[in-house]
Protein backbone atom coordinates (compact mmCIF):
# COMPACT_ATOMS: atom_id res chain seq x y z
CA UNK A 1 0.00 0.00 0.00
CA UNK A 2 1.58 3.23 -1.15
CA UNK A 3 0.11 5.82 1.12
CA UNK A 4 -1.11 5.71 4.68
CA UNK A 5 -4.83 5.63 5.09
CA UNK A 6 -6.21 8.47 7.12
CA UNK A 7 -8.52 7.46 9.92
CA UNK A 8 -11.90 6.71 8.50
CA UNK A 9 -13.69 6.84 11.78
CA UNK A 10 -15.45 9.56 13.58
CA UNK A 11 -17.04 9.04 16.94
CA UNK A 12 -20.38 7.93 15.52
CA UNK A 13 -19.05 5.37 13.06
CA UNK A 14 -18.95 1.67 13.82
CA UNK A 15 -15.76 0.55 15.53
CA UNK A 16 -13.35 -1.31 13.19
CA UNK A 17 -13.35 -4.28 15.60
CA UNK A 18 -17.11 -4.70 15.12
CA UNK A 19 -18.33 -2.64 18.07
CA UNK A 20 -21.34 -0.35 17.68
CA UNK A 21 -19.36 2.86 17.67
CA UNK A 22 -15.68 3.70 17.94
CA UNK A 23 -16.39 6.15 20.72
CA UNK A 24 -18.21 3.58 22.85
CA UNK A 25 -15.76 0.80 21.99
CA UNK A 26 -12.00 0.97 21.36
CA UNK A 27 -11.66 4.77 21.72
CA UNK A 28 -11.62 4.29 25.48
CA UNK A 29 -8.34 2.39 25.15
CA UNK A 30 -6.77 4.10 22.10
CA UNK A 31 -7.68 7.68 22.97
CA UNK A 32 -8.73 7.85 26.60
CA UNK A 33 -6.04 5.73 28.22
CA UNK A 34 -8.33 3.21 29.89
CA UNK A 35 -6.86 -0.22 30.60
CA UNK A 36 -8.40 -3.09 28.63
CA UNK A 37 -9.96 -5.39 31.24
CA UNK A 38 -9.54 -8.64 29.28
CA UNK A 39 -7.21 -10.06 26.67
CA UNK A 40 -10.11 -10.09 24.22
CA UNK A 41 -10.78 -6.38 24.75
CA UNK A 42 -7.08 -5.69 24.25
CA UNK A 43 -6.96 -7.84 21.13
CA UNK A 44 -9.94 -5.97 19.66
CA UNK A 45 -8.34 -2.63 20.48
CA UNK A 46 -5.10 -3.73 18.83
CA UNK A 47 -6.97 -4.73 15.67
CA UNK A 48 -8.57 -1.27 15.68
CA UNK A 49 -5.11 0.25 16.18
CA UNK A 50 -3.84 -1.65 13.13
CA UNK A 51 -6.76 -0.30 11.09
CA UNK A 52 -6.02 3.22 12.31
CA UNK A 53 -2.22 2.87 11.96
CA UNK A 54 -1.76 3.69 15.63
CA UNK A 55 1.84 2.52 16.10
CA UNK A 56 2.34 4.01 19.59
CA UNK A 57 -0.65 2.10 20.96
CA UNK A 58 0.47 -1.16 19.31
CA UNK A 59 4.00 -0.88 20.69
CA UNK A 60 2.72 0.02 24.15
CA UNK A 61 0.47 -3.06 24.24
CA UNK A 62 3.20 -5.45 23.01
CA UNK A 63 5.23 -7.50 25.52
CA UNK A 64 8.69 -5.95 25.85
CA UNK A 65 10.51 -9.18 24.93
CA UNK A 66 8.67 -9.67 21.62
CA UNK A 67 7.99 -6.05 20.66
CA UNK A 68 9.52 -4.79 17.41
CA UNK A 69 11.69 -1.69 17.68
CA UNK A 70 9.48 0.22 15.30
CA UNK A 71 6.32 -0.37 13.37
CA UNK A 72 5.37 1.07 10.02
CA UNK A 73 2.36 0.46 7.86
CA UNK A 74 3.97 0.76 4.42
CA UNK A 75 3.01 -2.79 3.47
CA UNK A 76 -0.10 -3.05 5.58
CA UNK A 77 -3.19 -4.21 3.73
CA UNK A 78 -6.57 -2.61 4.18
CA UNK A 79 -8.35 -4.54 6.91
CA UNK A 80 -11.94 -5.56 6.26
CA UNK A 81 -13.19 -6.94 9.54
CA UNK A 82 -12.57 -8.95 12.68
CA UNK A 83 -14.23 -12.03 14.09
CA UNK A 84 -13.21 -13.30 17.53
CA UNK A 85 -13.58 -17.07 17.63
CA UNK A 86 -12.51 -17.92 21.15
CA UNK A 87 -11.19 -16.35 24.34
CA UNK A 88 -9.31 -18.81 26.55
CA UNK A 89 -8.44 -17.54 30.00
CA UNK A 90 -5.50 -19.71 31.12
CA UNK A 91 -5.04 -18.09 34.53
CA UNK A 92 -5.17 -14.61 36.05
CA UNK A 93 -2.34 -13.33 33.93
CA UNK A 94 -2.35 -15.50 30.78
CA UNK A 95 -4.95 -15.75 28.05
CA UNK A 96 -5.29 -16.68 24.39
CA UNK A 97 -7.59 -15.20 21.79
CA UNK A 98 -8.36 -16.91 18.50
CA UNK A 99 -9.58 -14.65 15.74
CA UNK A 100 -10.03 -14.25 12.01
CA UNK A 101 -9.13 -10.89 10.49
CA UNK A 102 -9.95 -10.29 6.86
CA UNK A 103 -7.89 -8.05 4.59
CA UNK A 104 -7.63 -7.19 0.93
CA UNK A 105 -4.67 -7.68 -1.41
CA UNK A 106 -4.82 -7.22 -5.16
CA UNK A 107 -8.59 -6.84 -5.10
CA UNK A 108 -9.08 -10.15 -3.29
CA UNK A 109 -10.10 -10.78 0.29
CA UNK A 110 -7.84 -12.93 2.45
CA UNK A 111 -8.09 -14.29 5.96
CA UNK A 112 -5.59 -14.13 8.79
CA UNK A 113 -6.52 -16.85 11.30
CA UNK A 114 -4.42 -16.62 14.43
CA UNK A 115 -4.37 -17.68 18.04
CA UNK A 116 -2.61 -14.94 19.98
CA UNK A 117 -1.08 -15.20 23.43
CA UNK A 118 -1.40 -12.42 25.97
CA UNK A 119 -0.04 -11.79 29.44
CA UNK A 120 -1.03 -9.40 32.18
CA UNK A 121 1.84 -7.74 33.99
CA UNK A 122 1.99 -6.30 37.50
CA UNK A 123 0.69 -2.95 36.27
CA UNK A 124 -2.62 -4.66 35.42
CA UNK A 125 -2.18 -4.26 31.67
CA UNK A 126 -2.67 -7.02 29.14
CA UNK A 127 -0.03 -7.21 26.44
CA UNK A 128 0.35 -9.22 23.25
CA UNK A 129 3.17 -11.79 23.28
CA UNK A 130 2.96 -13.74 20.01
CA UNK A 131 0.64 -15.94 18.03
CA UNK A 132 0.25 -19.10 15.99
CA UNK A 133 -1.22 -18.97 12.51
CA UNK A 134 -3.75 -21.49 11.30
CA UNK A 135 -3.60 -22.61 7.68
ZN1 LIG B 1 -13.71 -1.66 19.05
Image: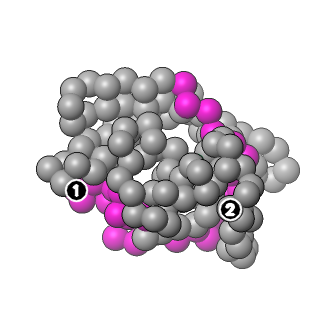
The foreground one among 131 and 62 is: 62
Provide the secondary structure element on which disc 1 rests. Answer: loop
**At numbered mark 2, what does the secondary structure look like: helix, strand or loop?**
loop
Q: Residue furthest left?
A: 122
Question: Where is the N terminus found, in terms of image quarters?
Answer: bottom right
Image vertical order of residue 25 relative to residue 40, above or below? below
Question: Is residue 61 highlighted in magenta?
Answer: yes
Give the camera-side residue of 119 and 67: 119
Q: Which residue is mark 2?
A: 11
Q: Is residue 47 visible?
A: no
Name the image quarter holding residue 5: bottom right
Ligand 1 is within 8 Å of the C-beta of the residue at disc 2: no
* 47 w.r.t. 10: above or below: above
Q: Label 1: how many residues lie within 10 Å, few (<14), some (14-19) or many (20+)?
A: few
| Residue 54 percent location from the top left of the image | 52, 67
Q: Nearer the viewer, mark 1 or mark 2?
A: 2
Mark positioned earlier in the residue sequence (1 or 2): 2
- Left or right for 89, reference 77: left
Q: Is residue 14 above or below residue 51?
A: above
Q: Disc number at residue 65?
A: 1
> Which is the main secondary structure of the residues drawn in magenta?
loop
Furthest-right residue in this view: 107
Gap between marks 1 and 2 measured at Cα: 34 Å
Q: Position of residue 15 (x, y in %)?
A: 66, 50
For the point 68% across and 43% down, the residue is 20
Q: Which residues are magenta?
A: 57-85
Q: Residue at x 77, y 42 (%)?
A: 109
Return the x and y of residue 84 as percentages of the image width and height: 55, 31
**Residue at horizontal 48%, vertical 29%?**
98
The spot of residue 105 in percent (x, y) is: 75, 51
Residue at the image point whose x is 21% and y is 26% from the top: 91
Amino acid sequence: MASPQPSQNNEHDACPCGGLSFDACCARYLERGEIAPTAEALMRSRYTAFVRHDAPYLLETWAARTRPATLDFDDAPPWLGLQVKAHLQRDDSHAEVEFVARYKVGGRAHRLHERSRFERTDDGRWRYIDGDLFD
